[in-house]
Every structure is written in C-alpha cells, then in structure tokens.
Image: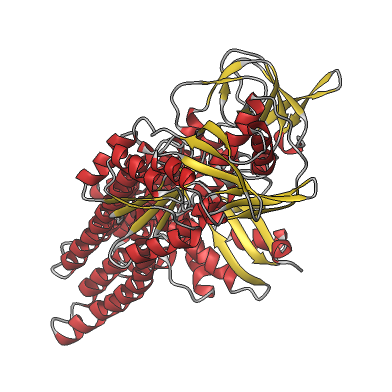
Amino acid sequence: MSEKEQEQIFLVSGICCADCAKNFESELNDIDTIKSADLNILTGKLKIDGQIELTELRKLGQKENYQIDYYNNQVLAVPKKYYHAKEFLVMVLAGTLLLLAIVFEKMQIGGQLSVGLYLLAIISGGWNNFKKGFYSLQQKKLNMSVLMSVAIIGACIIGQYEEGATVAFLYAISELLENWSTEKARQSIRNLMDLTPAKAIVKRGREMVELLVGDVNVGDIILIKPGAKIPLDGSVVSGESAVDEAHISGEALPRDKKIGADVFAGSINTYGFLEVAVNKLAQDSTIAKIINLVENAQSQKSPMQKFIEKFAEIYTPVVMVLAVMVGVIPPLLYDGDYIGWLYRALALLVVACPCALVISTPIAVVSAIAQAAKNGVLIKGGIHLEGLADINAIAFDKTGTITKGEPKVQNVISLSNIGENDILQIAASLESLSEHHLARAITADSKDKQINLENVYNFIAIPGQGVKGVIKGQEYLVGNTKLFNNISPEINQLEQQGYSVIIVGTATTILGVITISDYLKDNIKTVIKRFLQKNIAVSMLTGDNSAVATLVATESGIKEFFANLLPEEKMLVIKKMKESKKVAMVGDGINDAPALAIADIGIAMGKKGTAVALETADVVLMKDDIAKLDYVMELSKRTKNIIKQNITFALLIKFLAIISIFPGYLTLWLAILADMGATVIVTLNSMRLLKKT
C-alpha cells in the first residue's frame, strides 16, 4: 500500500484545549496500526498515517466529547451550537448551586444542605473534567483534567467544599472561555474559506446546472454573474469585466479581465457577465493552496514553539513532584499542619496546568499567517515566519524581482545571410517552450509581427545559458554568451550598452542577436532604501551580463551585485553569504530554485513565478509587490515579540502563583482564575496580529 493510500484524514469537532488535543493525539500514536497521528487544534483536521476505523475513532473521541467524521474537503471543524449551549448551561447550573450553598451556609440554614449543594455544584461543574481525568489515568497520562480532578476531590477530602465547588465552577467558565478564544482564532481560517462559494453554475450545452465545486471538472464552462464570487480558477472565454482580487493578491483595485485573462477562485466579479473555462480542480485552486498553507502552518513548527512544547512536557511533572513534596515534607519536619500544607499542594497542582504556555505560540503563528495571506503573502509554516524576523541580508534576482519582468525586444540584428524575421522565427519557436522572462519577450514580439512558429524537436533547456532544439533537421541554439564560443566584439559592445543580448545560432555559427531591455519596478528604489536604513545588507544576483547588472544596480541603489551567474553559482554566493549572515533569497525563475532552496528563507514572486520557484520557496509574494517583503518581515518581528510577551506573561503568572502558595496566599480558586486568565489573555494578545497595521 502506498504512503498516500495509508493516509486517512478526519474532522474533529469540540476541541478547545491544546493539552487535551495533544493527549488525544498521543493516545492515537500508541495504537499499533497507526504510524503517526497529527491533530490540528485550530482546524480540527486529524491526519493519520495508518489504519483505524471511524467507529473505533469515534469511541476514543467520546471520552473527550469530540465529534469525529471523515474529512470531505471541509476546511475546519465548526463546533456544534448545542456544544456551546451545553457548556453554558453547565456553567450556569454550577454557579447557581454554588451561590445557593454559600447563601445557606452564611445564613446558617441546614449545614448538611449546604454541603449537598456544594457537592452538586462540584458534580455538575466538574463531571466532564472527571471523565476526561479518569480516561487519562487509564492511559497512564497526566494532563489538566487529572490535575483539576485531584485538586477538586482533594479539597472535598480536607473539608474545603466551598473551595472545591468554586474550582469546579471556575473550571466550567474556563472551558467556555477557552472554547470561545480558540473559536476566535479559528475564525481567521474560516474567513478565508468563506471567500469561495460552495456551488458553481455550469454550462452544459444549452442548460445551466448548479453543481458543488468539487463536482466541476477541468474544461467545464462556468457562468459568473455581476457581483458574484468566482468559485474556481480558470480563464475567460466570453465577456469583459473587472475582478476584485484583493483577497488573493492583496491588490486594492479591481483588475480588468477580457477573453484569455486568468481569474481566481475567491475573487469577486464586479460588473460584467463572464464565462470562464475551468483550468484547475477546486482542491488545486490558488485560494485552496492559500487555505491549505494557513491550515498546515503548525506542521513546520518554529524553534520557539518546539522549545515551549518541550518545556511544558517537563514543567507539569516537575510541579507535580513539587506538589507532593509540599504536601508531605513541611508538616513532617515543622508544624504538623497536614491539612494546611495539603491545601497548598492542591493549589500547586492547579498551577501545574500548562494551557497558557502551550497555546502561547500556535495561535500567534496562525493569526499572523492568516493575516499575511489576506495581504497577498503566503508563508509556508511557523518556522519560516519566525525565520523572517532574523534576516539581516537579502539577495535579489534581477529580472521580475528588481525589474518589472516585462522585457521588450528592442532590436533583431542579423550577423549572417539569414534575414531578421527568420532569426526571430527560430528564436521564438524554441523560446515558446521555455518559461524564462526573456523567452516571453521574444515570443510576444514574434506574435506582434505575425511570424508563424515552427515545430521543435529534441528541445532542451540549459539553466543559466539558454535552450536548444531541432527545426527542420537543423539543431539551433538560443541563449546568452555562455552557450557560444567566439563572441564577436559587436555582441560585447551591445552588452556594454546595457542590453540583455540573446544570441541565435548553430553549434558552429552565430546567425544573429536579439537585444532586450527591461525597466525597474516603480517602488524598488524606496524598498531598497528602507532595507538599507534598517541595516539589512542588500545584493543582486543575475545571470545577465555585467553591463546590464551595473546599470540596474546603480539605478536601484544596490551597491553589491554579482553578474554572469549560473544557477549553481547563485547557490554558491548564497552559501558564502550564510557564513556570516541570515540570508533571504528573492527570485522567481527556474534559475533561482537552487538559491531559494539553500537560503535561510526563500522568497518567490507568485504572480509570474515558475512552478519550480513557487514549490521551492518558503514565502510567496502573490502580487509580485516587492514592498510586501518589508511588510511580512515587520509582521514576523511583531509576531515574535507577541510570542515572547505571551511566554513571559504565562511564566510570570505561574512563578507568582508558585511563590504565593508557600506563605498561604494562593487559594484554589485564585490558582484556577490565574490559569484561566492567562490562557484567555495570551489568546487575545495573539489575535492582535489579525488587525491591519
């Protein structure tokens, strides 16, 4: 059975606690038929590498009150309405019983009645927690449910019924608030999903059929009414309009769309009626990839998150051991006050709950990645988000990154007895099979001049040099000076003038040249200046000749550049830079893929970038707006600061709680209030990243 066939994906609803989710994941990993299980608390997506029946999985999930189904292209788990209502009713019931018990006790009405009401408040508020704790003990696992159960039962044993009932009531509130705060974080992903309609109107002959987007095939014609959201990626085959692509590329103004133009799922058709030929299935659309990246942000955990998870694993058992010592040693050695020190030990058990710590990082990471996605920047995981904050050197490719990537043919010059149109025909025929920017300029020029292309056989792309292939039995080469021998002074002179020169010839003869020029992006000077002001080293790597490189570097304000580089040479430059700096590489072509892969952070231009560059990169700028790089680096620094704030705050609360226990200042209800408050505060602090800056 293949690896893909082994993978099962399920949807889990009802997750509200990071610690509980981790324990459920751990329980699944202990099953012999499962190689690995990965549960995402924010999306509810459970990936299992191995085999397990849904009925067995549901049985395991019932212990945690989870509802589990197969994953059928939904984006995230949405807890059922009754689940929130049930939690609210439990909290109200526990609170009411607690209040009545306190009133009766203060009024000295029926002492046993007050105890009975306290016990009912404990049972109603803590029943769900007791069940989870019991199942965890069966699995020999320590988690929050076990700690809280021991604390509540221990309070009853020493006669502190009011404290036990108060803890049960506050725990019921804690579950409700934690579920609410987790749902708020989930909403950032749900908002992305809401961009795409669930159904599409498909043209079948003369009929219009409404189908689920998952049932629409590549090649189907879908109809897009004015004001409607586009359900699938495709190209316009009829009609004209302007399409709002703000959620895809971050571009504020709608883009004009005519026949042949590409449109993307999740964008909005503003005024015209469009017929669109679908060119990607729903799961392969651009917006689906964006959602998938945000969903899976936790799969590549940052060093900070890994540290916190490791720390939490050590922290809980250490505090539990400390709690046992507090409950036993002081009364034996000093005053013999077993009840007082046991009470302190129970409070310490509550402090051992690591929820605020565990959740301090993932919600911040997902919030930041979701916000970046809404602004047209895709970040492929928390490790890359954190890495961006440490970058102190950026290497830019030239074409399509510093320049507009819209090169134009300036001259076609014959250096043989072959005419200029024939030279252009040979070059365009070969370059029509290439993805290089300069290739597009040549094919566009041949199209403008209505030159027909010839069939090409044995086509080969030579990275960093050019292409070759056979036309009518003759092998031709099209590329830069590295592809040819005996370069004439005339060609060198053209390069010195700042042109990109494409040579057309055979293995033995140069037939002619095509000169091409490109223009700087409008905002590149401002962006480069901003990076330099922040003490970030900036350099340019290009396969183009040194004259073009000098001209572009001078105009854009870049002092360090490397020209005439092959792909492997770009990679070596990045490798050398990494010896002393944290390096980001920005590029968009096949030639950039090795350098993108070896850089600390690889950044691809998504709009015109090749599939190889997009696949290799860690970050993708969907709109090709280089200013977004500055935005995402600032977002990364802000995220890192917020995570540090969260961790510092959570640890400070824990530390203050622990030292307050020994003099007897910390009560059980204050301990759980501190834990609950810390969890909610770090969640809300993380969600500040969802706000526009």
Outermost residue, front side = 417
**Quarter of the rendering containing residue 555:** top left
Residue at 21% from the left image edge and 60% from the top image edge: 652
Q: Quadrant of the N terminus?
A: bottom right
Q: How many marks do you count on the picture?
A: 0
Residue 3 percent across, percent down from the top left:
69, 66
Outermost residue, top side = 271
* 597 left or right of 200 in image: left
* 239 left or right of 380 in image: right
**Above or below for 100 versus 151:** above
Residue at 66% from the left image edge and 51% from the top image edge: 506
Residue 649 percent across, percent down from the top left:
23, 55
* 624 left or right of 112 in image: right
Asked if residue 457 can be seen in this view, the reply is: yes
Asked if residue 120 can be seen in this view, the reply is: no
**Quarter of the rendering containing residue 368:** top left
Give 526 or 323, whichever is nearer the viewer: 526
Residue at 64% from the left image edge and 35% from the top image edge: 424
Residue 483 percent across, percent down from the top left:
57, 55
* 664 left or right of 152 in image: left
Residue 448 percent across, percent down from the top left:
63, 24
Give 91 or 84, whichever is nearer the viewer: 84
**Above or below for 425 versus 653:** above
Residue at 54% from the left image edge and 59% from the top image edge: 39
Q: Quadrant of the C terminus?
A: top left
In this figure, which colouring scheme has been used for the structure?
secondary structure
Outermost residue, bottom side = 333
**Above or below for 565 versus 400:** below
Give 600 or 522, whichever is nearer the viewer: 522
Give 141 or 8, whichever is nearer the viewer: 8
